[in-house]
Amino acid sequence: NLGLAVILLTLITRFLLLPSSLKGVRSQRALNKLQPAIKEIQKKYADDKDRQMKEMMALYKREKVSPFSGCLPLLLQLPIIIALYQVFLRGLKDSSVKTSLYSFVSQPAVIDFNFLGIINLSESNIFLAILAGALQFYQLKISMPKPQKSQGDDFSQAFQQQSVYFFPAITALIVWNFGPIIGLYWACSMLFSIGEHYIVKKRYNT
């Protein structure tokens, strides 16, 4: 069953990435707590961007927080996503499967494209596209820092708020155009990320 295979692949991938992923979640929550200090630096050195950047880097170093650690798990997943796209792009007909498999892997007699009896993974599916986008929205919503009140315009804060809606919409569009296999993988991956978030939240009482 193709759907079960994708879910199993997702779980294996996410468990292998669990150490770096948990580190990224903890780092993101630490960054959220540092928002008042970051705002203060931005306000104090508003006219000196170089000094502002140096002070922020010093703050990250002092608090042992990396602003880029949350990107690592996503970057490590990109090869998997590209591979799944290639599988969907080439199709899973008997002829393509026979030429695409490694020599030590036996060709399956039957490939079941039906998932849960209602989703055909061989063609675009609006339900999976919406589900992947909705889970992406929720994951971003719970992981991003709460907006801080400020006197002036804050581009970074506005970008964060807009990205909560922008990236889920892009996710849904990609899944709709490039296939439900990617959608199923991404939906399962987002559920895993949401679980990580609440585990870290409970573990550190934050």
Image (cartoon, rainbow, N blue to C red):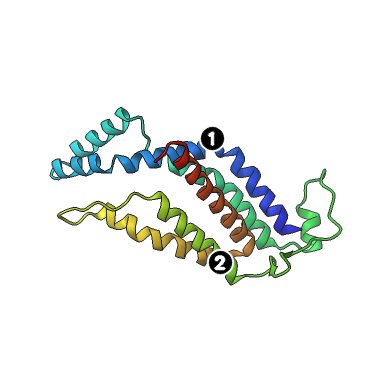
Q: Position of residue 120 (x, y in %)?
A: 70, 68
Q: Are the residues tagged 2 and 1 within 8 Å (C-beta)?
A: no
The mark found on residue 129 in the picture is 2
How crowded pointer 1 is (Cα within 10 Å; few <14, some 14-19, many 20+) is rated as few
Q: Position of residue 152 (x, y in %)?
A: 16, 55
Is 132 in front, or is 48?
132
Q: Identify whether 19 is placed above or below 83.
A: above
How crowded pointer 2 is (Cα within 10 Å; few <14, some 14-19, many 20+) is rated as many
Q: Amino acid at mark 1?
A: Pro
Is 169 in front, or is 11?
11
**Residue drawn at the location 51% of the way across and 59% of the way down:** 135
Q: Is residue 121 left or right of residue 19?
A: right
Q: Amino acid at mark 2?
A: Ala
**Residue drawn at the location 68% of the way across and 54% of the way down:** 6
Q: In which quadrant is the N terminus drawn?
A: bottom right
Badge 2 marks a residue whose secondary structure is helix
Looking at marks 2 and 1 on the same chain, the residue that comes earlier in the sequence is marked by: 1
The mark found on residue 57 in the picture is none
Q: Is residue 86 left or right of residue 170?
A: right
Circle 1 residue: 19
Q: Identify whether 151 is placed above or below 58.
A: below
